[in-house]
Amino acid sequence: MIRRILPAIALSGLLLSFLTTGCATRGTRLETSAPPAPPVVEPAAADSAGAAEAVENLDAEPFREDVLEVQGTDEALEAGLDAAAWNERGVLATVHFGFDSARLTDAALATLEANARWLREHPRFRVIVEGHCDERGTTEYNLNLGARRARAIRDHLVRLGIDAERIETISYGEERPVDPGHGEAAWAKNRRGEFRLVNP
């Protein structure tokens, strides 16, 4: 009886060992044969911003050369301005004079150089030179002084190459002060020659 049981126990132990080994091998084989899961990568913050910008740019209007042709260059736009528009921009600077004088100072000469350059570059415009004075002196005297100031400016512009036919002069005397004050600071501003462009 014992002889019959021992071979059965040995056989069952061998069978159990085989099954256990086979299962372990099969389990290992299944783990190695399964494809690895792809790594999960979170997009960087900059990439997200770039993607959002790319999506927004899809709605952007494409570059069109005909828009540039319509708009033109700054020079073309400026060439189309009339005298009033140039006057608003203040392209011709004011010239100032000393007390009771129509003599052009060094600062006035430098200003007239710049003004003459602009007038040469824009030959289609005429210019009115206005002579102004401060409040001191009689009305008649200041009208005469303003006229002498305007003529001094015109003559120098002609020497700088501006056609005399393009320049008119007028005197306002003390009638149009830029500063209504009654001290030297105000008077210095009011002793001046101003420029007003006129369309052809």
Image (cartoon, rainbow, N blue to C red):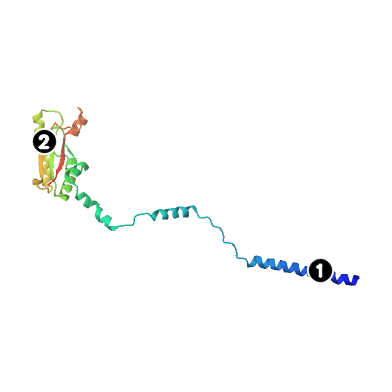
* Label 2 residue SS: strand
Closest to the observer, 160 or 178: 178
Residue 125 as seen in the image, left or right of residue 20? left
Q: Position of residue 85 (x, y in %)?
A: 20, 44
* Rendered view: 103 above or below 181: below
Q: Residue at x 72, y 67 (%)?
A: 23
Residue 82: x percent and y percent? 17, 46
Q: Residues within 10 Å of mark 2 (few under 14, many from 20)?
A: many
Instruction: Name the kind of residue labelled 1 in the image.
Output: Gly
| Residue 141 in sight here | yes
Q: Is residue 176 above or below residue 195?
A: above
Between marks 2 and 1 in the image, the one whose residue lies nearer the viewer: 1
Q: Is residue 72 in view from this perspective?
A: no
Q: CA distance from mark 2 to mark 1?
A: 131 Å
Looking at the rendering, in which quadrant would you find the N terminus? bottom right
**Residue sitting at 39 percent across and 55 percent down?**
57
Q: Amino acid at mark 2?
A: Ser
Q: Which residue is mark 1?
A: 13
How many marks on residues?
2
Circle 1 — which element? Answer: helix
Q: Earlier in the sequence, mark 2 or mark 1?
A: 1
Percent position of residue 109, x then y: 16, 43
Query: Where, by quadrant of the figure, is residue 69 drawn?
Result: bottom left
Give x and y (percent) for residue 136.
14, 28
Query: Front-most of 165 and 71?
Result: 71
Q: Where is mark 2, residue-wise?
A: 171
